[in-house]
Amino acid sequence: MPFIGYAVNQLPTWLTASAIQRRTLPIGLPTTADNDQLSEYVAAATALYQIEHGKPLSLGIMADGRLASVQVISLIKLLQKQGINRYNLVTNMEPDL
């Protein structure tokens, strides 16, 4: 599902764009107080997984040295607000070439 990671209001543009044009679209889900699509997405995904599989969803946070720790902390706080306190932290220890 390559469209995951785009704001809902960008989906019509994403769907009509060519593969090259899609690379230029901004990636990221809004997390502002009045438009918190990331929280909604996480809540919907965890609820659906629970219904479908009868167990909690196992989440992972993938980050590397380019991601500011403040962003990781913000994501962890967002998960904690939803009662999610277990997740895997995934990093790439190999240097970029």
Image (cartoon, rainbow, N blue to C red):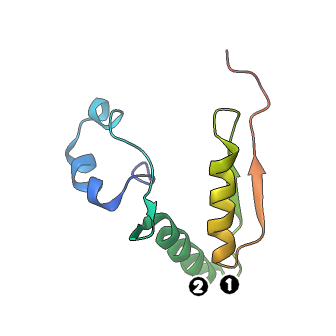
Name the secondary structure under disc 2.
helix
- Indicate whether 37 appears above or below 96: below
Q: As rendered, which of 67 and 16 lies closer to the eye?
A: 67
For residue 64, which quarter of the picture?
A: top right
On the image, the x and y values in percent for residue 85 come to 76, 71
Q: Residues within 10 Å of mark 2 (few under 14, many from 20)?
A: few
Residue at (42%, 58%) from the top-left corner?
A: 30
Which residue shows up at 71% across the image and 66% down it? Answer: 58
Question: Do tag 1 and tag 2 residues touch (Cβ < 8 Å)?
Answer: yes
Hey, which quadrant is residue 46 in on the image?
A: bottom right
What is the distance, in whole Å, between disc 1 and disc 2 at their CAs? 6 Å
Q: Say above or below: 71 vs 77.
A: above
Q: Estimate the x, y position of residue 83 in percent, counting from the top left.
A: 69, 79
Residue 32: quadrant of the picture: bottom left
In the image, is residue 74 above or below residue 78? Answer: above
Q: Nearer the viewer, residue 16 or 64?
A: 64
- For label 2, the residue is 51
Q: Which residue is mark 1?
A: 54
Seen at 64% across and 76% down, the residue is: 81
Sort mark 1 into few (<14), some (14-19) or many (20+) by Cα contacts within 10 Å: few
Tag count in the figure?
Answer: 2
Where in the figure is residue 23, as x and y percent of width and height?
36, 33
Mark 1: which secondary structure?
loop
The circle drawn on residue 18 is none
Q: Considering depth in this image, is 10 or 71 the residue closer to the camera?
A: 71
Amino acid type at image mark 1? Gly
Q: Amino acid at mark 2?
A: Ile
| Image coordinates for residue 18, horizontal then vertical, percent | 24, 36
